[in-house]
Image (spheres, rainbow, N blue to C red):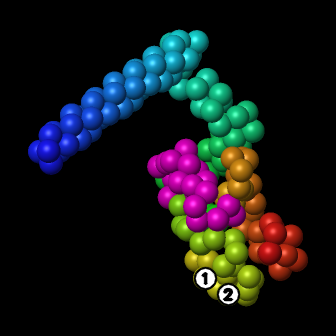
């Protein structure tokens, strides 16, 4: 009697596994098809148009202005105003490559303007501040950045 119950249980388990596999596979194929068909309207889109669609006009225009302001072999200070998990600093560094970023850290850690000024090595003129929520970065002259930092005009504290 016990062996019959065990074999029935194995058959039911196998049947449930097969049904869940078929349902999952069907949903996976359906979702992949929907995503593929959703990209049809963007077929042949160039990199600039794709960047503008994904990141927005403000982001693309700000990055273009930064690329004009900072020479290809130049460098800039990078401050993460969106928090460590926002990823804005990575996008800015990617978009401004091969320009060298000197990372100052998260904005929340830069509360002492005197310490920040002493930690900033001479050289880079621009400070690029990432903004949370996918907004375009803000770029300031080094002295303007320090002035706003003293006045606590940069971001929430």
**In the displayed structure, does residue 75 sit left or right of residue 60?**
left
- Mark 1 element type: helix
Which residue is under mark 2?
115
Magenta residue span: 81-100
State whether residue 28 is above or below residue 71: above
Q: Inspect the magenta stretch and tell me whether residue 114 lies in it.
A: no
Q: Inspect the magenta stretch and tell me whether residue 93 lies in it.
A: yes
Q: Position of residue 56 (x, y in %)?
A: 70, 34
Q: Position of residue 67 (x, y in %)?
A: 61, 44
Q: CA distance from mark 1 to mark 2?
A: 6 Å
State whether residue 71 is above or below residue 75: above
Determine contact: label 1, label 2, CB under 8 Å. Answer: yes
Q: Nearer the viewer, residue 61 or 43?
A: 43
- Mark 2 element type: helix
Q: Position of residue 22 (x, y in %)?
A: 34, 24
State whether residue 121 is above or below residue 130: below
Q: Which mark is residue 119?
A: 1
Q: Position of residue 126 (x, y in %)?
A: 67, 61
Rendered residue at 74%/82% (across/down): 111
Could you tell me which quadrant the N terminus lies in? top left
**In the displayed structure, does residue 153 sit left or right of residue 28?**
right
**In the displayed structure, does residue 51 sit left or right of residue 35?**
right
């Amino acid at each position: 009697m016990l062996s019959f119950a065990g074999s029935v249980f194995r058959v039911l388990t196998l049947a449930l596994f097969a049904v869940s596999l078929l349902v999952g596979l069907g949903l996976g194929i359906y979702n992949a098809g929907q995503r593929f068909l959703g990209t049809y309207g963007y077929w042949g889109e160039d990199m600039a148009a794709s960047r503008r669609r994904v990141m927005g006009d403000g982001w693309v225009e700000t990055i273009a202005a930064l690329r004009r302001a900072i020479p290809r072999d130049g460098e800039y200070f990078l401050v993460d105003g969106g928090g460590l998990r926002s990823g804005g600093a990575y996008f800015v560094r990617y978009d401004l490559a091969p320009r060298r970023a000197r990372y100052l850290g998260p904005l929340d850690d830069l509360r002492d303007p005197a310490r920040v000024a002493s930690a900033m090595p001479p050289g880079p003129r621009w400070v690029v501040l990432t903004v949370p929520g996918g907004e375009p970065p803000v770029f300031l002259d080094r002295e303007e950045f320090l002035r706003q930092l003293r006045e606590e005009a940069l971001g929430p504290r």
